[in-house]
Amino acid sequence: MRKIFLFFLLLFPVVLSAGFVKKVKSDPVAVIKTTMGNIYVELYEKNAPKTVANFIGLATGKKEYYDYKSGKRIKGKFYDGIIFHRVIPNFMIQTGDPTGTGRGGPGYMFKDEINADSLGLNKLKVRNANFLFQMYPQYMLQKFINKSVKEFYEAQGYHYIKNVKSIPPRKGCVAMANAGPDTNGSQFFINEVDTPWLDGKHTVFGKVIKGFDVVKKIARVKTDRNNKPLKPVVIKHIIITK
């Protein structure tokens, strides 16, 4: 018995080198270096592959975008020097707009990567979704009162997919900011709290794994009436690691 054990013990390194033991691929991590500290974000490649690829492409300078200063399409490290233009304590912090106004982006838009079924929106009835009654007028909800939230959102123009498992926008999650269905670009926000009313509306593509204290500090800086920090909080650089 001991000889058999020693045989397999000696064989194990050979098995590894031959590739018989499959290595578990880890998700990339984005280190967002800001003027108030570093935020480490695990990027969900399996859950939102196109969104993560877009983020990494902009962060590393491999993806082309529209440059507002030159009026040309260029490549460069898009996020370097961009401010957090909207911060709300007990809600979220938002960045990714090169104009700092909340209206800018990379000069293109791409589709949402959201599976409404994996979020349970196909089973949640409008009549039971109290948050909808705080966000939409009664007349819009009335004819969908016995239908699902998914069906209601689809009527508003949202398109859902089935080939991914979506992550809900909860505390610490990183999601794409948008101006409606399929209007993603470069802007994203980091949740300080759970936001179930945003389920099905924003592609979640990562989560803070370290530096959440920095998120909380940024959310509490002094702001103007538009929730824009009076003293700029800047992304100095984003590093992507494996």
Image (cartoon, rainbow, N blue to C red):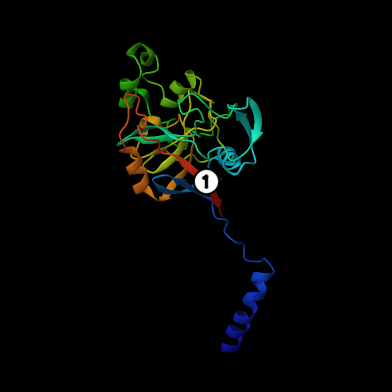
Q: What's the residue at 35%, 40% (across, down)?
A: 218
- Residue 238: percent from left, percent from top: 52, 46
Lateral position of residue 186 relative to residue 92, left or right: right
Image quadrant where residue 55 sits: top right
Q: Residue furthest top?
A: 139
Point out residue 6 in the picture as x, y percentages from the top left corner.
59, 85
Nearer the observer, 202 or 7 = 202
Q: Position of residue 48 (x, y in %)?
A: 54, 40
The total number of labels drawn is 1
Furthest-bottom residue in this view: 2
Q: Is residue 242 above or below residue 134?
A: below
Q: Which of 128/206 is in front?
A: 206
In the rendered image, which residue does mark 1 sit on? Answer: 238
Q: Local crowd at mark 1 within 10 Å, few (<14), some, or many (≥20)?
A: many
Residue 28 in view (yes/no)? no
Q: Please provide percent x and percent y for residue 129.
A: 33, 27
Identify the residue at image location x=62%, y=39%. Answer: 76
Classify residue 94 by image quadrant.
Answer: top left
| Residue 36 higher or lower than 178, as above or below | below
Q: Secondary structure at mark 1?
A: strand
Residue at the farthest right position: 18
Please state if 165 lies on the left or on the right of 108 as rendered: left
Left or right, 156 with reference to 126: right
Nearest the viewer among 153 and 134 is: 134
